[in-house]
Amino acid sequence: MLTLERILTPVDFSERSTAAAEHAVALARRFHAQVIFAHVMPPLPYEYAAFEGGYHMAALRPSEEERKKFLAQQLDKLVDRVFPDPAVEKLILSGDPARRIEEVIREKNVGLVVMPTHGYGPFRRFVLGSVTTKVLHDVSCPVFTGAHVEEIAPYAARPYRHIACAVDLSDHSQKVLCWAAQFAAAYEAKLSVIHSIQGIDVHGAYEEFFTPEMHRLLLENAREDVEKLLEKLLIQGNVVIESGYPERVIPAFAGDENVDVLVIGRSADHGLLGRLRTHAYSLIRMAPCPVISV
């Protein structure tokens, strides 16, 4: 049974972070978790503390205490709107946003972080905000995010009914699949387990290497591997095997099948790319639904 004692939602008072906070509240209600709302004040630019033309520019700016007081009032208003609960914890912090978020996760024993990406318009699929990217790289707890979070109806209007879990059959897949299954059980939702075989192109440049028969065998072997994993973990789910690049196949499946939340792994690779693997990065950017990376 999945338990979440504390959920952290960093906010910058944008529409995106407010939408993410609404998802955090919905999750907290389902799992009876405490919500921690945090806003981090980045350091003021160097030039504001410099002398120029006889003026001390810092004197023209509010003090840190004044900034904290104003931001605390803004945070109170946001929390009163989305989750007026006395158990809520509200933090106004200063420093590097990603580092302070990591500290809160560690010190408060946070079980899930809920935050939006930061891409806009046509560039949304190409970038993640620097803070979100660093948090995804550096923290070990699951992170709920997505480029389209602010466009998704809140839980009160549309509960999570279909959870998809993307697995690559690495050792980390077991942890990801168990988390997804428990999350789906908490919502009594349908669970689909999807695995894509990358690099197969039956009708393209590699047609001579991947005959239709070989293609069929590869799909059958992959299905058998996924079904064995489900059996080993005592998990029931709909198995979906596709051929193609994960960043194309999995978002397409999520859109076609009205997936409400996509669960993926991000911590299996501790090499040069850190914990945020290439496919995880792409899936978070391109999925049409929120993504929980475990």
Image (cartoon, rainbow, N blue to C red):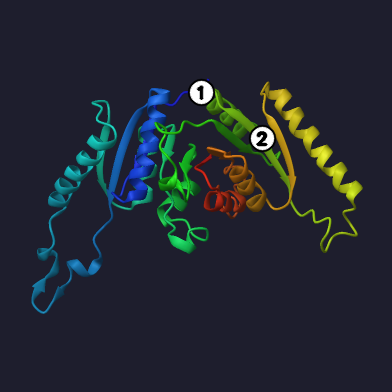
Query: Would you call the spot at circle 1 few (<14 residues within 10 Å), some (14-19), or many (20 or more)?
Result: some
Q: Vertical placement of 277 versus 87: above or below?
A: below
Instruction: Provide the residue designation for mark 2.
Output: 193
- The answer to whether 242 appears left or right of 7 in the picture is right
Amino acid at dot 1 = Ala
Q: Position of residue 71 (x, y in %)?
A: 20, 47
Is residue 142 visible to us here?
A: yes
**Separation of disc 1 and disc 2 at Cα?**
17 Å
Q: Which residue is mark 1?
A: 186
Is the C terminus in the top left, top right, bottom left or bottom right quadrant?
top right
Residue 20 position within the rendered picture, expressed as x and y whole percent measured from the top left: 38, 42
Question: Which is more toward the observer, 217 or 88?
Answer: 217
Q: Secondary structure at mark 1?
A: helix
Say which mark, if any, is on residue 54: none
Is 23 left, or right, of 284 in this rendering?
left
Relative height, residue 123 to residue 92 (above, below): below
Image vertical order of residue 129 relative to residue 234, above or below: below
- Where residue 253 appears, as percent x and y from the top left, is 64, 44
| Secondary structure category for the residue under label 2 | strand
